[in-house]
Image (spheres, grey):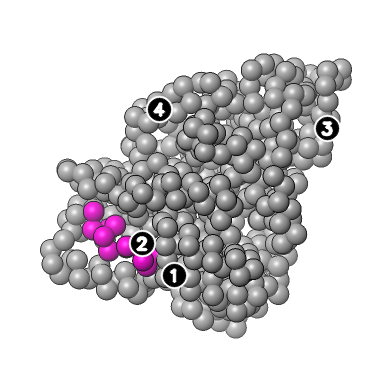
Amino acid sequence: MKKLIKNGTIVTATDQYEADILIEDEKVAAIGVNLNEQADEVIDAQGAYIFPGGIDPHTHLDMPFGGTMTADDYETGTIAAAHGGTTSIVDFCLTEKGQPLQKSIDKWHEKANGKAVIDYGFHLQLLEATENTLKELPAIVKDGITSFKVFMAYKNVFQADDETLYKALLTAKEEGALVMVHAENGDVIDHLVKEALANGNTDPIYHALTRPPEVEGEATGRAAQLTGLADSQLYVVHVSCQEAIEKIAEAREKGFRVYGETCHQYVTLDVSHLDQPNFEGAKYVWSPPLRDKKNHELIWKAIQNGTLQTIGSDQCSFNFKGQKDLGIDDFTKIPNGGPLIEDRFSIMFSEGVRKGRISINQFVDLVSTRTAKLFGMFPKKGTIAVGSDADIVIFDPNAERTISAETHHMNVDYNPFEGMKVTGEPISVLSRGEFVIREKEFVGKPGRGQFMKRKRFNEDAVIETATAK
């Protein structure tokens, strides 16, 4: 079935122009002015931007944590993502010590099969670097899982030691994978948490106070140094503060292959949200925690100058009632995470492009193209070009809305951005040429989303993106 999108303005990471787009067999078949191809459907995009579908490099769907399970699974989470302009996600596959890695991968495929409405891939967690674990990795990379996640925090739960991180970096260099780190010093955090509880400090604000920015900066610097030693490549997830930004900048100045991701919550919300009465601060408990507001502009500057390359959501939703309140008398028992997948695209457009902080091409680079290049999806994903998947967002740049749990599509009872006014909204969203969202209504099909077998890390592709402006 052929579709023809007419009268819109196509925007990629490098270009902006008016043209028509012909879609056939899930791909972009042609781009041109006044295309006269016969199509089964003509879509009028007058006054709209045509963006490549957003790619969220950081999600946690159907994930166990703290004795509970995330409120959004692969169906509700990907439906919400699609409403927000995201057409591909890369989710984190958790593993178990002493168990084959493939066992966990199979479990994550089961979670997604029959549910995902958009395309998805996996990052693979590494808890340990045993001989058996390392032997599995070449085949896993060959099967299209080309990124490994190492937690430097959550002691006695997810935290891996430095030997595991270093061996992961060595293997990644050899196999063409990208190592990701949650960079916080888990040992120091563990001490600070025990100290806070011993002093009777149990409110949500102490989640932030026991995870100060110094522990994020220290861990980021340590991971960067090990990357340089291994001559490998590193991606630091959810960067939240000046201390971490400085370590990434230092590493990049030395020529280390170190890349940084931040999230829309770290440029819009701040630590005061955790210090609210009636346990309301629990809604904002995630890690790293929200920081002092002064970090907002520092993060924007790091985005502008290329120190940080991507925007993830760190989607990890838990209901306020029945899940977050597990920690009502002990902040350590509050499940870490927030419902963040749906508003990433709009918030970054509204706060970035509309307010003059980034160009519209930088916006596309941040929410789609750079992620595609870093994680082996480009040019199939992350751009609008002949031969690319027809993952397309028809976007009204002037639409105004107020974010609210009353109108969002995530399976959770609150929205951390409640009451925020944004300008710019996805109107229709296509995944591989088929509508998932049409005129702001979900018309997709659970199970249509496909697993993305990603290519190996390609430094040349990443450099090309970085210098394309």
Q: What amino acid type should be assigned to the residue bearing mark 4? A: Lys
Q: Which residue is mark 4?
A: 421
Disc nearer the start of the sequence (1/2): 2
Disc nearer the start of the sequence (4/2): 2
**Alpha carbon distance from label 4 to label 2:** 29 Å
Disc 3 crowd rating (10 Å Cα; few below 14, some 14-19, many 20+) is some
Residue 339, position in %: x, y? 41, 43
- Residue 314 is one of the magenta-drawn residues: no
Image height check: is 132 above or below 294? below
Q: Nearer the viewer, mark 1 or mark 3?
A: 1
Disc 1 element: helix
Magenta residues?
205-216
Disc 4 element: strand
**Alpha carbon distance from label 4 to label 1:** 35 Å
Q: What amino acid type should be assigned to the residue bearing mark 2? A: Pro
Disc nearer the start of the sequence (4/1): 1
Residue shown at 39% from the left, 70% from the top: 185
Q: Which mark is residue 219?
A: 1
Residue 265, position in %: x, y? 41, 45
Disc nearer the start of the sequence (1/3): 3
**Alpha carbon distance from label 3 to label 2:** 48 Å
Disc nearer the start of the sequence (3/4): 3
- Residue 209 is one of the magenta-drawn residues: yes
Residue shown at 44% from the left, 51% from the top: 298
Disc nearer the start of the sequence (3/2): 3
Q: Nearer the viewer, mark 3 or mark 4?
A: 4
**Residue 91 visible in the shown view:** no
Nearer to the camera, 403 or 17: 17
Image height check: is 334 above or below 74? below
Q: Which residue is mark 2?
A: 213
The image quadrant where one finds the C terminus is top right
